[in-house]
Image: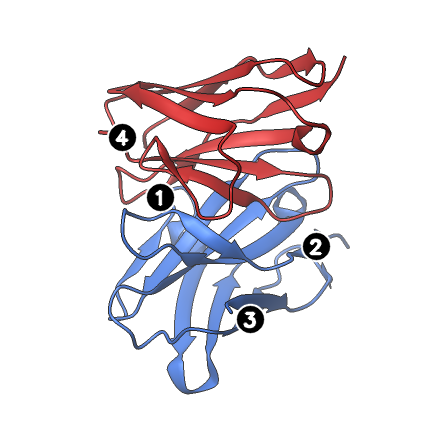
């Protein structure tokens, strides 16, 4: 299995802050990476795929980058509705794996 | 408009077999490229992928759970069924089914609301 790690595991930020979350794979995954947002009691929502492609309807303040084993999700200006947990997911391997999540809460 | 909904028991006893059904609309599992997956999430914990079935009946399973899982589809009913044998309290989780995003690999663009399954005697 490809193991996924995320850092930090949690962060506190204020509205308007720039937030960056990092996801690392245990081996190269050739940009086969998705990012999800999950709010309490809700299903995950796809934000980006192929590491940097924005899913339809997702605000442009969300962006993704990276290559090889290291990827980042950036929220350029945090909005009140962005407080949530974020997960990365690799699909390079037929055995799909998710990261452990990063919780973003209000400072 | 794509929708998915999970159904099944909310409580199962240890050693029992869990059967969950995903009923969907807005797409067909006979269309090339389409897939439906199952993902679970124990309370307060991370997401874990379980299984995936494709339009051509190709099936993929989590290696750690493969011996306990079976995924099938009924195209005429627009349903995907997941069975998990030998349930244990550690299998207590919200179970989601999700639509595989067409193009750009296996991520999931539409999700069901999830169903909480508790394993307890």
- Quarter residue B18 falls in: bottom right
Q: Chain of mark 2?
A: B
Give the number of the mark in front: 1 or 2: 2
Which one is earlier in the sequence, the residue at label 3 or at label 2? 3
- Mark 4 on the same chain as mark 2: no
Q: Which residue is mark 2?
A: B116
Q: Secondary structure at mark 2?
A: strand
Instruction: Give the numbered dot on residue A31.
Output: 4
Q: Chain of mark 3?
A: B
Give the number of the mark in front: 1 or 4: 4
Q: Which residue is mark 3?
A: B21
Q: Secondary structure at mark 3?
A: strand
Q: Is residue A62 left or right of residue A11?
A: left
Which one is earlier in the sequence, the residue at label 1 or at label 3? 3
The answer for how far apart the CA atoms under marks 1 and 3 are is 21 Å
Q: Which residue is mark 1?
A: B63
For residue B25, say whether it is visible: yes
The answer for how far apart the CA atoms under marks 4 and 2 are is 32 Å
């Amino acid at each position: 299995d490809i193991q996924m790690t995320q850092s930090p595991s949690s962060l506190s930020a204020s509205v308007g802050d720039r937030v960056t979350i990092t996801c690392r794979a245990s081996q190269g995954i050739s940009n086969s990476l998705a990012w999800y947002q999950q709010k309490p009691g809700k299903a995950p929502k796809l934000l980006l795929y192929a590491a940097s492609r924005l899913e339809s309807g997702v605000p442009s303040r969300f962006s993704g980058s990276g290559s090889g084993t290291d990827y980042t999700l950036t929220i350029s200006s945090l909005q009140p509705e962005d407080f949530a947990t974020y997960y990365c997911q690799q699909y390079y391997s037929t055995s799909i794996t998710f990261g452990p999540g990063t919780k973003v809460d209000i400072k | 408009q794509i929708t998915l909904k999970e159904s099944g028991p909310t409580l199962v006893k240890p050693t029992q077999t869990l059967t969950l059904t995903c009923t969907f609309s807005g797409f067909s599992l006979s269309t090339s490229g389409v897939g439906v997956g199952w993902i679970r999430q124990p309370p307060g914990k991370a997401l874990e992928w379980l299984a995936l079935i494709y339009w051509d009946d190709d099936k993929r399973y989590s290696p750690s759970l493969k011996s306990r899982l079976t995924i099938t589809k009924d195209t005429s009913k627009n349903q995907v069924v997941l069975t998990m044998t030998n349930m244990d309290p550690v299998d207590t989780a919200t179970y989601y089914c999700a639509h595989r995003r067409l193009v750009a690999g296996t991520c999931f663009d539409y999700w069901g609301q999830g169903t909480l399954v508790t394993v307890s005697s």
